[in-house]
Image (spheres, helix red, strand yellow):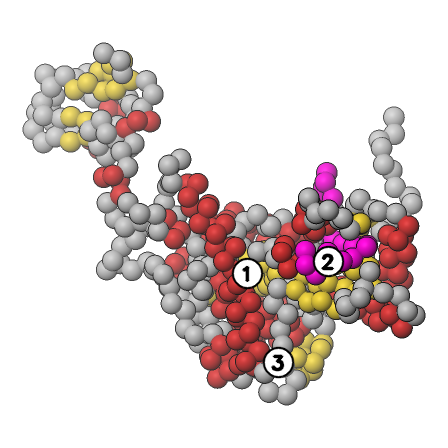
Amino acid sequence: MAPRMIRGAQAVAEAAALCRPQVISAYPITPQTVIVEELAQMIANGKLEAEFVNVESEHSAASVVLGASATGVRVYTATSSQGLLLMSEVLYNIAGMRLPVVLTCANRSVSAPLNIWNDQQDSISLRDSGCLQFYAENNQEAVDLLLLAYRVAEDHGVMLPALVCVDGFLLPHAYEAVDVPEPKEVDAFLPPYQPLYRLDPDEPLTFGAYAEPDKYMEARYMMQRAQEKAISVIQEAGHSFEKVFGRPISALMERYRMDDASTALVAMGSVIGTIKDVVDELRSQGQRVGALKIVTYRPFPKELIYHALKEMENIIVLDKAVSLGSGGPLATEIRAAFQGSPQPPRVSGVIAGLGGRDITMDTIKRIISQAQKEVMEAEFVDLREDMELEGVD
Amino acid sequence: MKLTVGLVARPGTSRANKTGGWRSDKLPRFLQAKCTACDLCALTCPEGCIFGEDKNTYWADLDYCKGCGICANICPVDDIEMISEVC
């Protein structure tokens, strides 16, 4: 289908509908609400055959999709920020029960202070939950990764929930040209969900039962193996995607002008668009700069990342989240990938864009020139000066 | 029992998973002397592991009893006593 100029929320909702979920449950929260509003409207207008369950909180929304998924149907939900945090208790259960729930997270900062704008602290805080995590650069990827997420999550070698992360406001509220595929193409790429186990009164099963110390560790080990297996499943799904839809997808990561680069910027999500513009500008001035976009954050494709970055002199990792008391979560893992290598590159970590602070091309250019002078551990960029850092007696 | 994906369990696993080992202090002894078969001990047992039908026939399945003592506490004729685990 030809690309149409549509709002991100509409594109994501149309993609979700194309996956034919039978149960959708969600609770409104800015900036996600626009997505499920579209879906609710489609169901009310008879354009989508699905059950929309209205609930009183995100904890309940996650619980509804957990239960529905356990009965063997495809489900969808979406949330942001505090909503995702409220879901987190249930999401750990969804992952542990190995239910392939797919969720769009419209990334937003977390309270306090209250702030509705974009960063990625919400989904990063679910790093260790067992959920797969994909980060979209633009609305086309928000659509494509949603289709891919279902296919990977439902693979019998994986069977884990997936978060498709889209930078709040920057994507759901932005109008872009998006190619939303035809239903028959999506059906060819994404066959109906075949559960491994499902709740059925005629053949009772228990999901999420109690496991003593002689079993629990194996359950977690199986999840770790499934995460590792997901790397090849994502690669395979990416190839299949290109065959069915006739256009490329960056499923694990994307190398942008990395050939012969000596400095690489690494980031996730929509900021990659700005970074690519900076790379183009600096390349036109003869600077050997490239960018590495991490699309799949969980599982973390560390071997591919290592090989993509091992020739670099300077690596600059931009995190839109912070592990308070440590540093940038992505920077920490990129550094770990080079642990033990004979000549590790210089890895700088910068924290930027928290709570909707703009990351401009100038910001990125300043970061690059600073990183060429010194290695930054976890530098907060573009900070104001007027802060009270210690209490006054 | 093989560990399934998600540790999904078929019915009847509690037959294999005996939990009486959690009992840490005392266990009930059914004296079977003054019992009136009122059934209160079986009805209030949180584990559902007390059985009996007629007077002086009640007993607790120690494979599952946690030793909470509710049965001994509720028995109207004091026909159950909590005794030390170690004999």
Give coordinates of residue A366: x percent, y percent: 90, 57
Q: Nearer the viewer, residue A129 or A266?
A: A266
Residue at the bottom extreme?
A2
Q: Residue at x 23, y 60 (%)?
A: A202
- The Cα–Cα distance between marks 3 and 1, rounded to whole angstroms, is 20 Å
- Are the residues flagged by discs 3 and 1 from a single subunit? yes
> Which segment is the magenta one?
A306-328
User: Is A9 covered by the magenta stretch?
Assistant: no
Residue named by callout 3: A247
- Position of the C terminus of chain A, as image quadrant, is top right
Give coordinates of residue B68: x percent, y percent: 31, 24
Give coordinates of residue A199: x percent, y percent: 32, 58
Whether residue A39 sits left or right of residue A219 in the image: it is right
Q: Nearer the viewer, residue A314 or A58?
A: A314
Neighbor class of circle 1 (other Cα within 10 Å; few <14, some 14-19, many 20+) is many
Of tags 2 and 3, the one toward the viewer is 2
Amino acid found under the numbered disc labelled 3: Arg
Q: Residue at x 73, y 63 (%)?
A: A292
The circle on residue A231 is 1
The circle on residue A309 is 2
Marks 2/3 in contact by CB < 8 Å: the verdict is no
Q: Secondary structure at mark 2?
A: helix
- The Cα–Cα distance between marks 2 and 3, rounded to whole angstroms, is 26 Å
Of tags 3 and 1, the one toward the viewer is 1
Q: Secondary structure at mark 3?
A: loop
User: Is A317 covered by the magenta stretch?
Assistant: yes
Q: Kindly identify which chain the residue marked by label 3 belongs to.
A: A
